[in-house]
Image (spheres, rainbow, N blue to C red):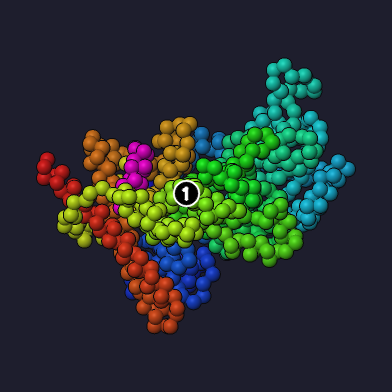
Amino acid sequence: MSSIDEINARIDIVDLVSETVQLRRSGKSYTGFCPFHTNTRTPAFVVFPETGTWHCFGQCNEGGDIFGFVMKREGWDFSDTLRYLAEKAGIQLKPVTPQEQQAAEEHDNLRLLLEEAVTFYHHYLLNTSAGKVPLDYLHQRGLKDEIIEAFGLGYAPNAWDDSYRHFKSKGQSDKDLLEAGLITERESGESKETSGFYDRFRNRIMFPIRDERGRMAGFGARILDPNDVPKFINSPQTPIFDKGHLLYGLDRARKDIRNRDQTVIVEGYLDVIALHQAGYTNTVSPMGTALTEHQLYLLKRYSRRIVLALDPDAAGDRATLRGLEISRQAMDHEQEPVFDARGLLRHEARLQADIRVTTLPAGMDPDDVVKSDPGEWEHILENSRPVVVHVMEALAANRNLEDPKIKSEIASQVLPLIEDVPDPFERETYRQRLARFLRLDERVLISPGRPRTGRAQRPRSTPRKQAPAAEATLSPDARFSSEAYCLGVLLRRPDLVYRIDRKLQEDSLPRLSFDDFQAAEHRTIFQLIQESLDQDEVEPLNYVMNQLSLPLMELADGLLARTEKLDPNEERVLDELMRQFLFLRQRNLRQANEHLMFLMEDARDSGDIKALEFTKQVNQNLLVQQSLDMALGRYTSRSFVTRTSA
């Protein structure tokens, strides 16, 4: 039995959840108020002892097992949660390998060195004559001493090797200083001064960058002299600094993100700090890079509701909307935050999140807004719009919508976005909205022969007899066995994710997401599989295995072992995967509806208006169930034909 299995066997989910949630028994389940959002009327949080899982049927609409509960409650990753639950269960985890131990120690040393650098730069800002100019600049931007202290802002002196000499006097090695990204080695042919190294950061305001747990990872640095270039630089890629895996301010924002159930993403460090000072502490920044799926997964731990607050140049200029992508170039020719409408829709679908866009008043930064009227920021966020609507209105801004050519141009750019929306009801709503917006008959937005759902559909044979109910309603052991099989196949063949997504969309079903897995360890591995497909530096399997901790590596080895003898016929493998995923979704949906029915009746008896909302959810689930039944019947009958013909 693995460490994960032992923990699941020893820790009762009801006992664990009861530590922070008051539960009451309701048949075979337990209900209470969700700890992840404010709600004092309807207990929509349900714990299922038989399956060892939980689900919120309210605002969160999330669920999982004991690992998922602790990860969401504490904001930890899987490794931290594993250690915590192992200690709670009295289980001795297998010791890390010597290589893992050495890497962990090296990373800890780098973090300590970076903490020393925070102190060094902070001292230069507050306690030296050279720091007066940058400190005055920060005060002019409206930052108070308390917020400067809280974020640990600093100043890198205007010299080639001041910090280098300081750290060398403290006994730090050139190797560690290079690995921490604090110094740069002189290239061959450069003039030699006191050493072969010089400070990476000079005459810049320093912004310490921490990971979501508050551990130092690197620095961002802004110029003071307008003649210097580039305007912003970050630490280089290091063992602990990866821009695509970090969000500035998340360590301080995560609690308020959970409380408000909303993340606001702005463009710069100073934007984040100004908004935190004004009380909007649910704000983060992607540090001058396009949003990555890893960053969005990171945010989804705390809230599915995400608002991109972009300046008008980045999000509203028609000239830069060409191709439905918006990008601006920084002075060092690195990309600043990118608004990619289609990319955001893909993220939104895969994460099952609610991603919206809002723009700032012309010529204003977030600190300008909150300084003039803090309440205006709340108003701006309330007026955020879905991605499709934002693009629709941005393309039409200040244009003559009576001109047929302009109507055609806007429709030709917005319709592909609508087609990318996976939910058929949303697609239809957006199409109707576009027709009203352009004052057109909706029928002209549908190509001849194209179905109203916007999805190409192939001829379907009449579904044969549906799979037996015993197969669709999986026991906990059978469910996790199905999850393990699916995950093992995807580990071996990550490219099948794309083919499964296409098949699911043909049936108007959402793409794969980690919500298809209930076990937290399975979710973690699936997330890595998705990340492996977004990079092209190493083979996907190698990428996944390199990111895993020892317990998860053992689990992955087991998943690979159980799928070692796959059918050589790829179509049969794909059919079996589809069948298993559809079984899992069907089981999830049926369980969800059972408990929604209970909550609906409970709310109706108490006169709670929530009863209408639960009824709506049940009806929506029934529509999804019909699509699942049709798809499952087809794949089951296909498998039957294959077996009998063989």
436 sits to left or right of 183: left
Question: Residue at position x 77%, y 34% from top?
Answer: 228
Quarter residue 29 falls in: bottom left
Question: Residue at position x 55%, y 62% from top?
Answer: 261
Q: Nearer the viewer, residue 550 or 220?
A: 220
- Quarter of the image with the C terminus is top left
Residue 278 visible within the image: yes
Question: Residue at position x 63%, y 64% from top?
Answer: 379
Amino acid type shown at disc 1: Ser
Q: Secondary structure at mark 1?
A: helix
Q: Nearer the viewer, residue 469 or 551?
A: 469
Disc 1 designates what residue?
A: 408
Question: Residue at position x 43%, y 43% from top?
Answer: 530
595 sits to left or right of 384: left
Place of residue 407 in the rendered image (x, y in percent of width and height, measured from the top left): 49, 51
Place of residue 501 in the rendered image (x, y in percent of width and height, measured from the top left): 35, 46
Q: Main secondary structure of the magenta part?
A: helix
The correct choice, above or below, for 378 with respect to 449 in the image is below
263 sits to left or right of 520: right
Q: Nearer the viewer, residue 49 or 37?
A: 37
Residue 67 visible within the image: no
Place of residue 178 in the rendered image (x, y in percent of width and height, measured from the top left): 67, 30
Q: Which residues are magenta?
A: 492-507
264 sits to left or right of 419: right
Q: Residue furthest front?
A: 403
Q: Nearer the viewer, residue 16 or 205?
A: 205
Crowding near pointer 1: few (<14 within 10 Å), some, many (20+)?
some
Place of residue 492 in the rendered image (x, y in percent of width and height, measured from the top left): 34, 37
User: Does the magenta-highlighted stretch encompass residue 216?
Assistant: no
Q: Residue furthest top?
A: 189
